[in-house]
Image (cartoon, rainbow, N blue to C red):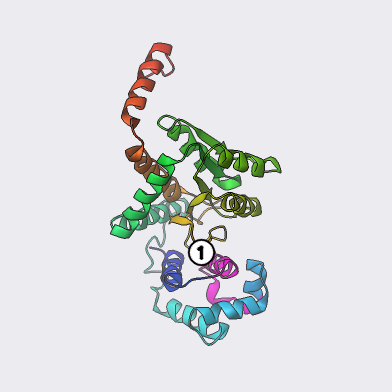
């Protein structure tokens, strides 16, 4: 684990177990994404980066059990002193591309460890049952998360009779969510990755008002789009390259898809019938 990854993991452990407000989750997310420089940010700088007020940063630190932001920053700096030096850090001397791949491997290890815990598998199984039971199944993912939503919807449609992909924003998005609810939907699946679009949060508010149970696949437990009562599943994104990498969230989506397939009556029969039709039509080359 490199120094930034180690700092991110330490911050994640700090935030776990605290019920943070949406504003506080926004600050927490900003700290994790900037874990390598978090210990050197002033409260004003952190507030500007997170898009919140400076008093909100102070209240955030107090909510975590510190006497104020200076106490949180001291804690962050103590972590730096305890971290291995540059020559000892895992990946030191490697090419930046290789370090990015190694960081993603570490994220997958974290996901595997989470799925080894009973609470981790229980959340996946509960979400799978919710998605299997809802008719129709709306799948939401905007901007950076659109690819994850499209991939899930593509495969889910092979076993679920009514999947509705919501991967474009705009004023019609709320209409499509309301239409799904009126058609009988009981749940909505949302993929949300940094930077989290405002439209995603607004769309989820529409879904909640319509009575839908929201399942969110996101990059952290303090994602700004989730609310109490949502079923939140998390896997970290990589930040070592110019654009985030989402191997762990993508794999988490596939694990959730497997749980949904396990809960859909007759799923295996639908898959077999698709294979027969695909062979008859010559859809695939292999």
Residue that appears at 56% across and 69% down: 21
Which of 263/26 is in front?
263
Residue that appears at 48% across and 71% down: 19
Which of 282/99 is in front?
282
- Work out whether 124 lies above or below 224: above
Q: Is residue 23 magenta?
A: yes
Q: Position of residue 285 (x, y in %)?
A: 40, 18
Residue that appears at 57% across and 82% down: 69
The residue range painted magenta reads 21-44
Q: 237 left or right of 59?
A: left
Q: Residue furthest right?
A: 171
Q: Is residue 16 magenta?
A: no
Q: Position of residue 219 (x, y in %)?
A: 48, 56
Quick one: quadrant of the N terminus? bottom left
Q: Position of residue 122 (x, y in %)?
A: 33, 54
Query: From where the camera sits, is residue 42 visible?
Result: no
Q: Which residue is mark 1?
A: 222
Quick one: quadrant of the C terminus? top left
Q: 155 left or right of 226?
A: left
Majority secondary structure in the magenta region:
helix
Residue that appears at 39% across and 12% down: 280
Q: Position of residue 121 (x, y in %)?
A: 32, 53
């Amino acid at each position: 684990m490199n120094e930034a990854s180690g700092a991110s993991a330490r911050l994640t452990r700090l935030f776990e177990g605290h019920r943070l407000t949406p504003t506080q989750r926004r600050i927490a997310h900003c700290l994790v994404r900037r874990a390598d420089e978090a210990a050197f940010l002033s409260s004003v700088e952190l507030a500007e980066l997170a898009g919140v007020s400076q008093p909100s940063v102070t209240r955030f630190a107090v909510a975590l059990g510190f006497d104020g932001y200076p106490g949180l920053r001291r804690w962050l700096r103590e972590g730096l002193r305890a971290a291995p030096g540059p020559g000892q850090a895992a990946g030191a001397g490697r090419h930046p591309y290789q370090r990015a791949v190694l960081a993603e491997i570490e994220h997958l290890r974290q996901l595997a460890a989470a799925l080894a815990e009973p609470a981790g598998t229980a959340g996946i199984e509960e979400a799978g049952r919710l998605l299997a039971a809802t008719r129709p199944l709306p799948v939401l993912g905007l901007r950076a998360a659109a690819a994850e939503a499209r991939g899930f919807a593509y495969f889910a449609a092979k076993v679920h009779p009514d999947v509705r992909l919501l991967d474009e924003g705009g004023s019609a998005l709320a209409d499509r969510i309301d239409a799904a609810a009126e058609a009988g939907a009981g749940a909505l699946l949302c993929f949300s990755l940094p930077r989290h679009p405002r439209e995603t949060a607004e769309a989820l508010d529409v879904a909640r008002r319509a009575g839908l149970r929201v399942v969110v696949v996101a990059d952290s437990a303090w994602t700004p789009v989730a609310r109490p009562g949502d079923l939140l599943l998390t896997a970290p994104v990589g930040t070592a390259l110019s654009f985030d990498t989402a191997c762990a969230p993508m794999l988490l989506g596939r694990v959730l898809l497997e749980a949904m397939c396990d809960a859909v009556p007759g799923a295996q029969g639908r898959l077999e019938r698709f294979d027969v039709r695909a062979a008859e039509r010559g859809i695939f080359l292999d």
